[in-house]
Image: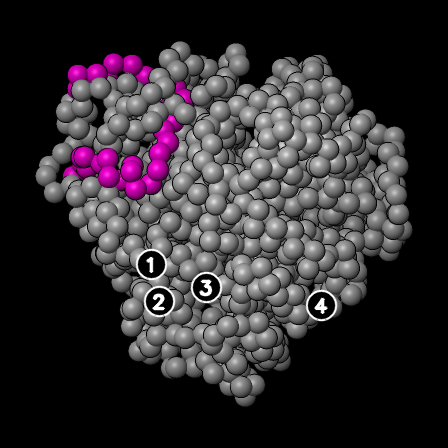
């Protein structure tokens, strides 16, 4: 693994090679291993070690980036030269800012050394940054192929016991990210993660569960396997229901996969580009009173590095408060542009928030550590079901795509465990539906929520999100299984 | 590179692997974009590394490293064997591979102009000129352009004696104009959406695409959509333009014929397939006019699925997938071919890069053009009432590949053989086999284009792969239109 010391040394070598006015180096990489199983057999099993050096040079208002995965002198010389050559032929961009210094980026210079894990999370004042919890666990980094195989063996045993077929993954990862620049920024982050995803398959049904954590001790393959198996068993012989508007209960993974499609729009760049559904809506009530959403990298259930693509400390921000969209996130240059733009009075608080991507880029920034606030009166999944006269319980959504960008209509399918609820009880499995649903409509019709949990899907970034009971969810078609 | 491969294969052999192959890959890419009159991003990247795939105790192991030193390569190979032995702890059967003759070969993409030889200034000038043309149309609120160049050099060496060196180039280019007004965002793209057209070619592709020549028309269409009527909802005959049909082929033919999906190997993520093994040579997939091939050979064209050899050393081939409407073939690999009674792989195993395990991927999955001369304008003239849909805007299909829904950027209602009005937000949906059985006309070869899809995701960890899809505009009868906006 690349160490902070070696990364700093690499930055020093690059500094000596460049004639640019400013230079920034982003180093990332690590070890990634994934054991994949299907048909109750491990059929793919992979491991990778790789690190990338990404160099951005700047000459006045001109900048460009080049990257390599080689650390020898000749490769470093070439990558610096490539970055400089690309930068020098750019047209000067008056919006390009000087690189930030350590004071401007804020936060700890080396968060990896400040491993102050927090047992509980207390909402802090907007913009303050309590220490990031430790996200590196030696035991998770040391997981072996044999240990992953042992976990898979437990999952297959559950499948065998229920006469099901199982497919899924068990992965373990360790990686680092560091950003350095010629104005003194030096930030470093170390992280581990483990993830288990399980599909249990019956003759005409299936069930699914997925979980991940920086610390593998939080994962329980047997419990996940049993839950997925129960879903496959309980949805056997699915019944076809007509499409239409239904009360829907989305489990957390289903909720995150669909709501995740709106967070690209919580960006100053999207507002400036006039392609955000929040254009003209910031400061107004867009969703129901019960919806409050934060971006908070330091939340104990969140993961990732506490700095952005320029090394700016990610700030904790309320994006939505009681249904009102209060603000969007900004990279440094986006904030500066917004302050000069005609939209500045309709864009919420305008300041760099630490959510920018590596420069140069055209996308700007995005909140990537979404945390839904707990509801005033949380309900368990069971309570939501028991209060539902007629509805649909959804385990997972699939192949979600945006159909209409301003009303934020998304389409997609249910998958791997879709149930019919009648008179407060889960009755039976049903064939999967296609939905075409506006996220504005959906989040304005949330009748109940559970306490938020860390959830992971396949279509959107992981989030801390509740299960949601939604009125009038729009199913438009039904498929054949 | 021969030394690197030998270090890996020798170590795998010494550790007890019954089969091993090593791939060393060097990738180089350049990405240039502009947005509203300025360069959006300018970046170069290179990545070099090696991987070892082994069979030990009847199970697979795979390890990859960026480090090409002897010690690192041997450690990587040893780790691959260790992983294979761990895999063998959870297996029902030993892996079987059909035989493949070993080969020593050198293959390269025919490339007239090395795209990396064109100056960055020239490229940026082209993009800024397009940008300027797009924004010269009043009402355009955002213009985006892109150019992408890739070069991949690979060495494949196997314990069975294969030694293959390949060099591939791919080039992509496109742009989009957005118009935001009132409560609506409309968009038009050229030559197609999501990064434009991509092929395994050099810079000559850029010269062929007539990018600048079409910019103003595309921008005008984006603005005009605001005054267009909403696409009607109901059952209509539809005509799909080629790039949209290419994506339709990708989603509703290309993915379901992947044999690893059919066998359940992708069940946890990408899904399975309705094309169970009993359907081979029995299912009427489409109407008699439907002939689809999976063709990776250079003679099919410069598609993103064109190569000399796949990533387990099997030569490029043409497999008939649908023949006169009958389902006749899957995409297979050395591990899966025996399950359909084949004694040879169809040659479709590919990896995103040096650090990824090769898996079954679409090559060029193409709908062959109609035999009789038929232009798009003639097809429109022969249509009583229908909707012509152009350029993809959204796409979604279930995990067995039955139910799909596509949205397009623009449409035109056709009545009595004429386009009578532009319509906005067109969408259509259906069930795969019902849809392909409703096809009743395909334009001829002069309307046929080998479209590139550069962003096909599959696998865990996910890999992104380029695929090719030849298509000519075609007509489908009695298709459900407008479902995407129903009740919204």
Mark 2 or mark 1, which has the lower sequence index? 1
Q: Chain of mark 3?
A: B
Q: Quadrant of residue B294?
A: bottom left
Q: Above or below — where is B350 with respect to A458?
A: below
**Residue A114 in sight here:** yes
Label 2 with label 3: CB-CB less than 8 Å = no
Label 1 with label 4: CB-CB less than 8 Å = no
Left or right: B203 in relation to A11: left
Which residue in the structure is indicated by mark 4? A143
User: Observer-nearest residue: B372 or A52?
Assistant: B372
Q: Quadrant of residue A79?
A: bottom right
For the residues marked 4 and 2, what is the alpha-carbon distance in whole angstroms? 34 Å
> Which is closer to the viewer, label 3 or label 1?
1
Is B428 magenta? The answer is yes
Left or right: B162 in relation to A30: left
Q: Chain of mark 2?
A: B
Mark linked to residue B277: 1
Q: Looking at the image, how many numbered discs can be counted on the residues?
A: 4
On the image, the x and y values in percent for residue A452 come to 75, 37
For the residues marked 2 and 3, what is the alpha-carbon distance in whole angstroms? 19 Å
The reply to the same-chain question for discs 1 and 4 is no
Q: Above or below — where is A21 with respect to A27?
A: above
> Which is closer to the viewer, label 4 or label 2?
2
**Residue B246 in sight here:** no
Q: Chain of mark 4?
A: A
For the residues marked 2 and 1, what is the alpha-carbon distance in whole angstroms? 8 Å
Label 2 with label 1: CB-CB less than 8 Å = yes
Mark linked to residue A146: none
- Which stretch appears magenta? B415-444
């Amino acid at each position: 693994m690349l160490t902070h010391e070696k990364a700093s040394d690499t930055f020093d070598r690059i500094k000596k090679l460049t004639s640019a006015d400013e230079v920034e180096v982003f180093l990332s990489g690590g070890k990634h291993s994934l054991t994949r199983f299907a048909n109750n057999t491990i059929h793919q099993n992979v491991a990778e070690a790789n690190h990338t050096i990404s160099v951005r040079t700047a000459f006045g208002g001109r900048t460009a980036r080049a990257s390599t995965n080689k650390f020898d002198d000749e490769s470093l010389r070439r990558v610096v030269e490539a970055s400089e050559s690309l930068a020098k032929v750019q047209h000067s961009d008056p919006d390009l800012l000087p690189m930030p210094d350590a004071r401007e980026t804020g936060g700890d210079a080396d968060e990896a050394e400040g491993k102050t894990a927090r047992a509980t999370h207390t909402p802090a004042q907007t913009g303050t940054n309590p220490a990031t919890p430790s996200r590196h666990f030696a035991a998770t980094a040391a997981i072996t192929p044999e240990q992953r195989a042992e976990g898979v063996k437990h999952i297959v045993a559950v499948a065998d016991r229920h006469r099901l077929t199982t497919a899924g993954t068990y992965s373990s990862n360790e990686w680092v990210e560091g950003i350095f620049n010629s104005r003194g920024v030096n930030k470093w982050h170390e992280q581990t993660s483990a993830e288990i995803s399980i599909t249990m398959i019956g003759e005409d049904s299936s069930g699914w569960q997925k979980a991940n954590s920086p610390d593998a001790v939080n994962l329980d393959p047997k419990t996940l396997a049993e839950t997925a198996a129960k879903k496959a068993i309980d949805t056997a012989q699915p019944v076809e229901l007509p499409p239409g508007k239904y009360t829907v209960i989305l489990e957390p993974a289903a909720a995150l996969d669909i709501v995740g499609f709106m967070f690209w729009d919580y960006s100053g760049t999207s507002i400036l580009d006039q392609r955000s559904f929040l254009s003209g809506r910031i400061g107004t009530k867009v969703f129901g009173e019960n919806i409050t959403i934060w971006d908070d990298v330091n939340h104990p259930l969140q993961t990732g590095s506490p700095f952005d693509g320029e090394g700016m400390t990610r700030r904790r921000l309320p994006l939505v408060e009681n249904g009102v969209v209060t603000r969007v996130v900004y990279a440094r240059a986006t904030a500066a542009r917004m302050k000069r733009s005609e939209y500045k009075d309709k864009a919420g608080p305008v300041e760099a928030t630490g959510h920018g991507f590596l420069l140069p880029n055209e996308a700007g920034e995005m909140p990537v550590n979404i945390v839904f606030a707990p509801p005033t009166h949380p309900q368990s999944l069971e309570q939501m079901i028991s209060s539902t006269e007629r509805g649909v319980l959804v385990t997972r959504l699939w192949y979600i795509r945006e159909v209409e960008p301003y009303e934020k209509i998304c389409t997609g399918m249910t998958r791997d465990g879709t149930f019919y609820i009648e008179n407060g009880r889960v009755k039976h499995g049903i064939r999967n539906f296609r939905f075409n649903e506006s996220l504005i409509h959906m989040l304005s019709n949330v009748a109940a929520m559970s306490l938020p949990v860390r959830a992971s899907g396949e279509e959107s970034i992981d989030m801390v999100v509740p299960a949601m009971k939604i009125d009038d969810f729009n199913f438009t078609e039904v498929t054949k299984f | 590179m021969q030394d690197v491969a030998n270090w890996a294969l020798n170590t795998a052999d010494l550790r007890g692997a019954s089969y091993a192959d090593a791939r060393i890959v060097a990738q180089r890419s350049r990405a240039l974009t502009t947005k509203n009159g300025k360069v959006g991003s300018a970046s170069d990247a290179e990545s070099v590394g090696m991987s070892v795939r082994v069979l030990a105790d009847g199970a697979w192991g795979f390890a990859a490293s960026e480090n090409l030193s002897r010690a690192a390569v041997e450690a990587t190979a040893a780790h691959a064997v260790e992983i294979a032995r761990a895999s063998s702890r959870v297996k029902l059967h030993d892996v079987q591979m059909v035989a493949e003759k070993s080969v020593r070969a050198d293959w390269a993409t025919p490339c007239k102009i090395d795209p990396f030889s064109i100056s960055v200034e020239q490229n940026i000038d082209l993009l800024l000129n397009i940008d300027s043309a797009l924004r010269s149309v009043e009402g355009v609120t955002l213009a985006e352009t892109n150019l992408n160049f890739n070069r991949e050099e690979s060495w494949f060496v196997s314990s069975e004696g294969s030694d293959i060196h390949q060099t591939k180039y791919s080039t992509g280019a496109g742009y989009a104009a957005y118009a935001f007004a009132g409560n609506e965002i409309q968009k038009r793209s050229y030559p197609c959406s999501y990064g434009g057209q991509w092929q395994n070619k050099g810079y000559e592709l850029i010269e062929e695409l007539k990018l600048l020549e079409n910019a103003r028309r595309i921008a005008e269409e984006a603005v005009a959509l605001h005054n267009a009527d909403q696409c009607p909802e109901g059952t209509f005959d539809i005509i799909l333009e080629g790039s949209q049909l290419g994506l339709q082929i990708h989603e509703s033919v290309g993915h379901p014929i992947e044999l690893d999906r059919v066998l359940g190997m992708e069940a946890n993520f990408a899904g399975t397939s309705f094309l169970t093994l009993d359907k081979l040579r029995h299912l009427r997939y489409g109407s008699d006019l439907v002939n689809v091939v999976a063709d990776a050979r250079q003679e099919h064209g410069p598609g993103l699925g064109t190569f000399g050899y796949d990533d387990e050393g099997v030569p490029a081939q043409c497999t008939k997938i649908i023949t006169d409407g009958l389902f006749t073939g899957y995409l297979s690999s050395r591990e899966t071919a025996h399950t359909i009674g084949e004694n040879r792989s169809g040659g479709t195993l590919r990896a995103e890069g040096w650090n990824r395990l090769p898996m079954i991927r679409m090559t060029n999955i193409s709908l062959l053009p109609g035999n009789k001369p038929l232009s798009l304008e003639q097809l429109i003239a022969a249509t009583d009432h229908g909707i012509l849909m152009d350029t993809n805007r959204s796409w979604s299909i279930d995990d067995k590949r039955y139910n799909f829904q596509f949205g397009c950027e623009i449409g035109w209602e056709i009545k009595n053989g004429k386009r009578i009005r532009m319509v906005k937000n067109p969408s259509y949906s259906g069930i795969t086999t019902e849809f392909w059985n409703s096809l009743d006309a395909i334009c001829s070869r002069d309307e046929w284009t080998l479209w590139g899809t550069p962003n096909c995701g599959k696998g865990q960890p996910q890999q992104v792969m380029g695929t090719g899809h030849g298509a000519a505009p075609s007509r489908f009868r009695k298709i459900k239109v407008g479902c995407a906006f129903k009740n919204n």
